[in-house]
Image (cartoon, rainbow, N blue to C red):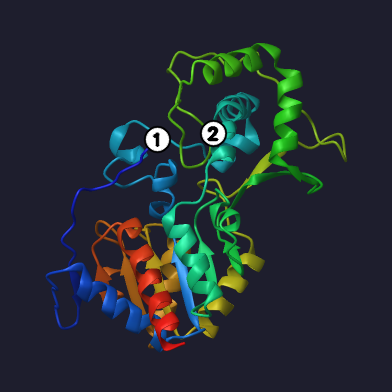
Amino acid sequence: MRIFVPIKIVPTIVNSNAIKPSSNIEVIQRMSNFFKANNGKLLILTGAGVSTDSGIPDYRGPQGTYVINKNYKPIFYHEFAGQHRFRQRYWARSFLGWPPVQKTKPNSSHIAFTQLQSLGYIQNIVTQNVDGLHQKAGTKNILELHGTLHEVHCMQCGHIQKRSNYQDILNELNPEWKEFLNQIESFKIKPKVRPDGDVDLPSNTSYETFRYPSCDQCKKGIYKPSIIFFGENIKSSVKLIASDMVKDCSAIMVVGSSLVTYSAFRLIKSAHDSGKNIVIINSGETRGDNLAWLKIEMLCGDILPLISQQITELIDFQK
């Protein structure tokens, strides 16, 4: 898990005028002005970098899954859908990974978004994250672009049930794995949780004994986590809602995303082609840097709470 709190960051802002402020104060002031200028019509796009301070790793950050484990290979949709052994492997690892994911709590960035939305500055949020932490923080008007870990659905009839209920079923079907999970929790061992909710286990681990249920409703289909696997298409209805949110906003702020996946990048490109300002807050390069009106090279947890505090204090002062 990644919980990274830097000692000190000197921020840099890059835009068409190549402005490079020397302190956090200028960043906070410029961002506060940006929020006020787009009062009520701002769209936020969040990525994995928003949740790292909650203990959920990202893929491409300094401590990301792809960086730490060069051989990491995520499960693909065709593998899960087509082969029993891949489903055994996924559900066994997810069985161990779900409890820590379920227990994660929103961090200061999630809370800042909720505060700014309650003040009327944020209209909608599109998130690439599947952890549900925006909802836990009380944020509203959220579109989960890549789905949610908190539900499973039948691939045949579409029946949906909560992931927590599905965990109870897996507990009953797999007493030996349940005992293994109990040992992990009793010894306070923290397995390396992946962004998609499973855990890293030794390469020689056998999953042949792991059992998973058929659908409660149709009795034939198999359950799949309600997230978008690699190689899986996003529903047309979700794409349409995301596109409508872009059309309806006055500007977009990207936070904690490298925009590598096209599902997110296309939204930024669409906004840019429509002449809308794009602000990117991210530690590291992104696919959309050349489209940004403003780029802030910072960890979101270091700047968002300060922006929220600045705006709140200004409102209180004006009262």
Q: Report the amino acid beneath label 2.
A: Pro
Q: Could you tell me residue 145's position as x and y percent?
A: 55, 60
Marks 2 and 1: in contact by CB < 8 Å? yes
Residue 23 x/y as whole percent: 16, 69
Q: Is residue 198 left or right of residue 253?
A: right
Query: Which label number is shown at residue 100?
Result: 2
Q: CA distance from mark 1 to mark 2?
A: 10 Å
> Residue 1 got which mark?
1
At mark 2, the secondary structure is: helix
Residue at the image position 35 percent from the left and 56 percent from the top: 301
Q: Nearer the viewer, residue 10 or 61?
A: 10
Category of crowding for the residue at label 2, using alpha-carbon neighbours closer than 10 angstroms: few (below 14), some (14–19), many (at least 20): some
Above or below, 150 against 214 in this view is: below
Of label 1 and label 2, which has the lower sequence position?
A: 1
Quarter residue 123 falls in: bottom right
- The residue lying at 34 percent from left, 59 percent from top is 300
The N terminus sits in image quarter: top left
Q: Which residue lies at the image location 33% right of the left edge and 47% below the top edge?
A: 60
Image coords of residue 161 (percent x, y): 77, 43
Rendering quarter of residue 175: top right
Residue 279: tell me if it is visible: yes
Numbered circle sitting on residue 177:
none
Q: For the residue marked with disc 1, what is the amino acid?
A: Met
145 is higher (above) or lower (below) than 5 = below
Q: Secondary structure at mark 1?
A: loop
x, y percent for residue 126: 52, 66
Asked if one can make out residue 212 in the rendered structure from this viewpoint, the answer is: no
Is 23 drawn above or below residue 149 in the view shown? below
